[in-house]
């Protein structure tokens, strides 16, 4: 995997991690301390808030998984990638495109998400 693909895999693994302590460690490894996540439904800063948001999404969609879809575009410190949220049967219930800004050390500075298909 290239750096962009590895970063996206690590990012989605956080959204799929059910254990809050493990998720917090993964966030601390991948995200800058003062990182920002924003999408049409949320706007949060910092590790604790990002972890809380992920936990809330998991509670709202139990048994669902985020998976990458399509190609990953990388340009300098920017990534653009798409994902799909699937239920336990594999049915897609939401789809989005995220834009990530990376620091020089490849940690996430910010992620801005757009919903291409709203959750059902």
Image (cartoon, grey):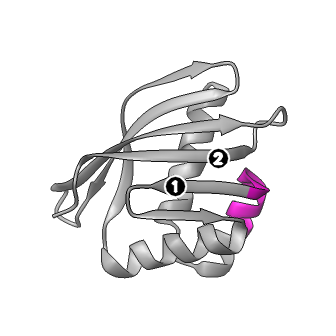
- The magenta segment is 25-34
* For residue 86, above or below residue 72: below
In this rendering, the count of numbered labels is 2
Residue 10 as seen in the image, left or right of residue 42: right
Q: Whole-percent x and y of residue 119?
A: 22, 61
Which secondary structure dominates the residues rendered in magenta?
helix
Q: Quadrant of the C terminus?
A: bottom left
Secondary structure, mark 1, is: strand
Pointers 1 and 2 in contact (C-beta within 8 Å): yes
Q: Quadrant of the N terminus?
A: top right
Q: Residue at x 54, y 44 (%)?
A: 9
* For residue 14, above or below residue 52: above
User: Residue 75: which quarter of the image?
Assistant: top right
Q: Residue at x 38, y 56 (%)?
A: 40
Q: Residue at x 16, y 63 (%)?
A: 89
Residue 96 badge: none
Q: Whole-percent x and y of residue 56?
A: 45, 78
Residue 110 badge: 2
User: Residue 62: which quarter of the image?
Assistant: bottom left
In this rendering, does residue 30 appear at all? yes
Secondary structure, mark 2, is: strand
State the residue position of label 1.
38
């Amino acid at each position: 995997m290239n750096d962009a693909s590895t970063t996206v895999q690590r990012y989605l693994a956080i959204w799929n991690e059910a254990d809050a302590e493990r998720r917090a460690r993964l966030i601390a490894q991948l995200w800058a301390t003062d990182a920002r996540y924003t999408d049409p439904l949320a706007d949060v800063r910092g590790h604790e808030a990002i972890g809380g948001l992920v936990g809330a999404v998991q509670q709202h969609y139990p048994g669902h998984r985020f998976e990458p879809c399509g190609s990953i575009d990388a340009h300098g410190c920017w990534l653009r990638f798409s994902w799909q949220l699937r239920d336990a049967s594999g049915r897609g219930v939401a789809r989005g495109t995220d834009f990530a800004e990376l620091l020089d050390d490849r940690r996430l500075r910010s992620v801005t998400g757009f919903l291409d298909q709203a959750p059902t």
